[in-house]
Amino acid sequence: MRMATLSLRGVKKIYDGGVTAVHDFNLEIADKEFIVLVGPSGCGKSTTLRMVAGLEEISEGELYIGDKLMNDVEPKDRDIAMVFQSYALYPHMTVYDNMAFALKLRKMPKDEIDRRVKEAAAILDITQYLSRKPKALSGGQRQRVAIGRAIVRDPQVFLMDEPLSNLDAKLRNQMRAEIIKLRQRIDTTFIYVTHDQTEAMTLGDRIVIMKDGFIQQVGTPQEVFDHPLNVFVAGFIGMPQMNFFDAHLLKNGDSYVIDCSGAKVALPEKIQTQLKANNVAAQDIILGIRPEHISFVHADKSEGALAGKVDVSEMMGSELHLHVSVEQDNGTTKDVVMRLSTSDLPDEFRGGIPYGTTLHFNFPGSLVHMFNKETEANLI
């Protein structure tokens, strides 16, 4: 039984001219784990994947697949298969020949090649296209062929570099579901690169969030959503993205309370205990709250709530997304996004909320995130 664990230890990529694309990358990947590297363009995620594939040289550090050091092993000898964003199919070959090509190079017996190609085609529902050329296929079908070409090699490790980014939104959703099904049918280790946090959240057992060549956080999708380690992770994970306010963490005797532009936010016992355990001082903070955790307050109960004027009202069917301008203490105006279920709205707002309407809102202290203003690190 092959064990496809991966270990990246202090891996760096330094290009000519001294530009460091990846800094001190450390990650242990378990056998059959699905790991997603996610982050904005230029964060080093594809470079990291290419170092695992052997397409980029590792400047410093060590890469192990299983217990074998891979730094100087040729890509073809690493027992990996890679699916690229651009499909990279041979236009003059049929789908069958595209999928069989790498196996023919290995001098594999014809009947074994035939078995593997037909099995992969059945898994991906492309059996009816085996005799066609790539130009006769849609984008989604071509991507299936590219994935099929990787499956037939039966690799220890499956690498995918933004495989869905060339597809339209509907097809992307379908293919994401296909990849989840595929993962259940072929039991191997996956490393998947994307800039799309929805893909990361739905596909990954764990996700690795990167920025400027550094790992920001590693965890399960739920862990990074519920407890982001810093402002960058908090803003990157979640759609629409988290709202951030300038606020003050105040200490009254033994208790903490948040002052956000005059609105007081009480904190529950659990958070009070964590703040005390970390010996957190009273300070100016960045306060984070997700759009779905904001709720309306009726005008006659608005004391201690925040107020703002509606700029944009987006009716999404089951949800209403609102952009509201809120005056902050420092005189600046803050754009706050709210995500409201249409079933919870008063009848007069079911079709949307008119521009300029003044709304009062608040949020529970149990769902806020507090970050140090200087370091941007989570306080708890």
Image: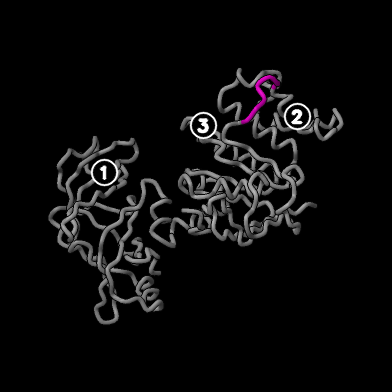
Residue 1 screen position, x and y as percent? 80, 52
Residue type at mark 1?
A: Leu
**Location of residue 233 with respect to 319 vertically, above or below:** below
Range of magenta residues: 88-94
Tag 2, which secondary structure?
helix
Name, please, the residue furthest toward the left: 300
Residue 104 included in the magenta stretch of the image = no
> Whole-Å distance between the Cαs marked 2 and 3?
24 Å
Task: Tell me what residue is drawn at x 44 percent, y 62 percent.
Answer: 229
Please name the residue that numbered disc 1 is placed on. 322
Residue type at mark 2?
A: Phe
Residue 273 screen position, x and y as percent? 38, 76
Q: Which one is in front, 3 or 126? A: 3
Please name the residue that numbered disc 2 is placed on. 101
Near mark 3 (Cα within 10 A), the count class, few <14, some 14-19 or many ≥20, is some
Q: Quadrant of residue 257?
A: bottom left
Task: Tell me what residue is drawn at x 52 percent, y 43 percent.
Answer: 194
Please name the residue that numbered disc 3 is placed on. 166
> Whole-Å distance between the Cαs marked 1 and 3?
30 Å
Q: Quadrant of residue 62?
A: bottom right
Q: Which one is in front, 82 or 324? A: 82
